[in-house]
Image (cartoon, grey):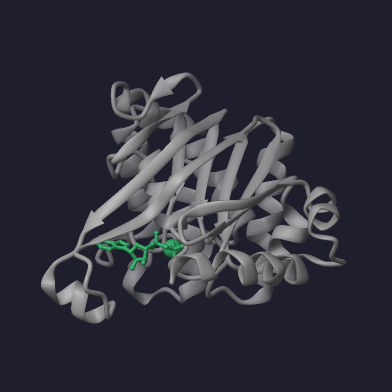
């Protein structure tokens, strides 16, 4: 279970960042008083446009960033106080952390397995299972540099699961993938859910949130603007699909920023 309690993350901007973001303010409130609970056996989807604060929130859960305010617990472990325990509980996948291009998927899988203190036999077993499922086996000894985008992403995903984590945190897991590869990823997320894992993903893809997620949290400018099952969100916004719901909410909440 993941519990985010009133998370706020403020970045200090460099002069260069201020120019790039066309702002006179030297801080950016990337996540603003965000709370959510993701439970075992459930896929929670954090849905929002580019810059909404999804990656920042997920990096805070993964102990890679420190909250400015608020707290986060993962299976009862606090991300600041018990960061080692949290890292053991979670499998984290992001577009920004790349596998070392010089090494092979097999090498990386074994390396991270050892890092997580998984015994060799179990590493072999899990590698066999994950590499078969994601059809990586023919490429397992090739340099990651030489693999296609889809194959790289599948290899990163397999590596993130080497220690069989109870909590899965995937940042835009299907972005940039072709539909067949994307489908294999979403199907695997369903398997993880059925296995009782807590699954939290971020996405900007409406149909993905609609079809895959048991619970959806819509995030705009760092704040949660609506949360619930698809049905609940449609009812609350009086709309017929998630895209319409999103734009209803966007009209209201994007104005507040200006
Ligand atoms: N390291 C950083 N320093 C300053 N601003 C950042 C940094 N990382 C992200 N931001 C800003 O914070 C906001 C949220 O970014 P992010 O969490 O990456 O959003 P998302 O993943 O939803 O696209 C954006 O305005 C982004 O420009
Ligand atoms: Mg992001």
* Image quadrant occupied by the C terminus: bottom left
The answer to whether residue 256 is above or below residue 110 is: below
Residue 56 drawn at (x, y percent) = 38, 53
Q: Nearer the viewer, residue 217 or 157?
A: 217
* Image quadrant occupied by the N terminus: top right
Place residue 179 in its image quadrant. Answer: bottom right
Q: Residue at x 64, y 31 (%)?
A: 39
Q: Is residue 121 left or right of residue 208?
A: left
Q: Residue at x 30, y 26 (%)?
A: 84
Q: Is residue 86 left or right of residue 208?
A: left
Classify the position of ligand 1 by quadrant: top left, top right, bottom left or bottom right: bottom left
Residue 177 drawn at (x, y percent) = 57, 73
Q: Is residue 258 left or right of residue 164?
A: left
Q: Nearer the viewer, residue 130 or 3?
A: 3
How many marks on residues?
0
Residue that lies at the very extreme toward the left in this rendered image? 15
Place residue 228 in its image quadrant. Answer: top right
Q: Nearer the viewer, residue 217 or 180?
A: 217
Q: Nearer the viewer, residue 64 or 174?
A: 64
């Amino acid at each position: 279970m993941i519990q985010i309690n009133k998370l706020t993350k403020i970045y200090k901007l460099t002069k260069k960042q201020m120019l790039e973001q066309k702002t006179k303010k030297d801080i950016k409130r990337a996540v603003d008083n965000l709370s959510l609970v993701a439970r075992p056996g459930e896929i929670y989807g954090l849905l929002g446009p580019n810059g909404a604060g999804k990656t920042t929130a997920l990096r805070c859960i993964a102990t890679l960033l420190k909250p400015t305010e608020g707290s986060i617990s993962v299976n009862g472990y606090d991300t600041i106080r018990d960061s080692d325990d949290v890292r053991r509980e979670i499998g984290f996948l992001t577009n920004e952390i790349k596998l070392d291009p010089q090494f092979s998927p097999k090498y990386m899988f074994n390396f991270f397995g050892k890092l997580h203190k998984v015994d060799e036999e179990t590493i072999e077993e899990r590698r066999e299972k994950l590499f078969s499922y994601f059809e990586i086996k023919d490429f397992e000894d090739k340099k990651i540099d030489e693999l296609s985008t889809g194959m790289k992403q599948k290899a990163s995903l397999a590596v993130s699961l080497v220690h069989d984590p109870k909590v899965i945190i995937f940042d835009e897991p299907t972005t940039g993938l072709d539909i067949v590869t994307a489908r294999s990823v979403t199907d695997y997320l369903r398997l993880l859910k059925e296995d009782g894992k807590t699954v939290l993903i971020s996405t900007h893809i409406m149909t993905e949130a609609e079809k895959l997620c048991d619970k959806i949290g819509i995030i705009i400018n760092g704040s949660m603007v609506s949360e619930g099952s698809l049905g609940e969100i449609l009812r609350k916004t009086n709309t017929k699909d998630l895209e319409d719901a999103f734009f209803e909410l966007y009209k209201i909440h994007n104005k507040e920023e200006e």
